[in-house]
Image (cartoon, rainbow, N blue to C red):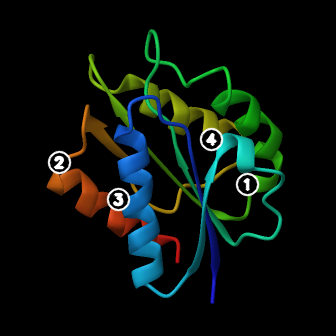
Amino acid sequence: MSKVAVIFWSGTGNTEAMANAVVQGAKDAGAEVDLLTCADVNGIDSYDAVALGCPAMGSEELEDGEFLPMLETIEPSLAGKKVVLFGSYDWGVGEWLENWEARCAEKGITLAAESVKANNAPDDEALDACKKLGAAIS
């Protein structure tokens, strides 16, 4: 059984709703799953796969008070693990996610499935895509 960490930061609850859908998809696929906020993370070595969720902030950036410092801490441990990204945005086209994917590529992190983004609150289609993310890393 694979062990999956779903790590997220959410300001409005939209990305948290997406995180819960990723957890459901991973559990349905038979994985052991931990749902963690940034403050809960103290290393990811015991996990086979990691799903990371963060909304777009400011000018299409990752949240830099809690999420970005946590991400910088675990990035060296992500190479070789199954990794997926998700999050919500309010305006623009979701460029923060493309930038985040490029950052992963630069760090040698291979994404296991196409990232999922939702405009504001995730609709049924976005939640289904999040469940598929969870299954993809299980």
Label 2 environment density (alpha carbons within 10 Å; few <14, some 14–19, many ≥20): few
- What residue is pinned by disc 2? 123
- What residue is pinned by disc 4? 104
What residue do we see at 37% from left, 51% from top? 18
Residue 2 placed where, x, y %?
63, 82
CA distance separating discs 4 and 2: 26 Å
Residue found at the very far top of the displayed protein: 59
Q: Is residue 119 above or below residue 58?
A: below
**Marks 1 and 4 in Cβ contact (< 8 Å):** yes
Q: Quadrant of residue 75?
A: top right
Q: Quadrant of the N terminus?
A: bottom right
- What residue is pinned by disc 3? 130
Label 3 environment density (alpha carbons within 10 Å; few <14, some 14–19, many ≥20): many
Q: Earlier in the sequence, mark 1 or mark 4?
A: 1
**Marks 1 and 3 in Cβ contact (< 8 Å):** no
Residue 53 placed where, x, y %?
50, 44
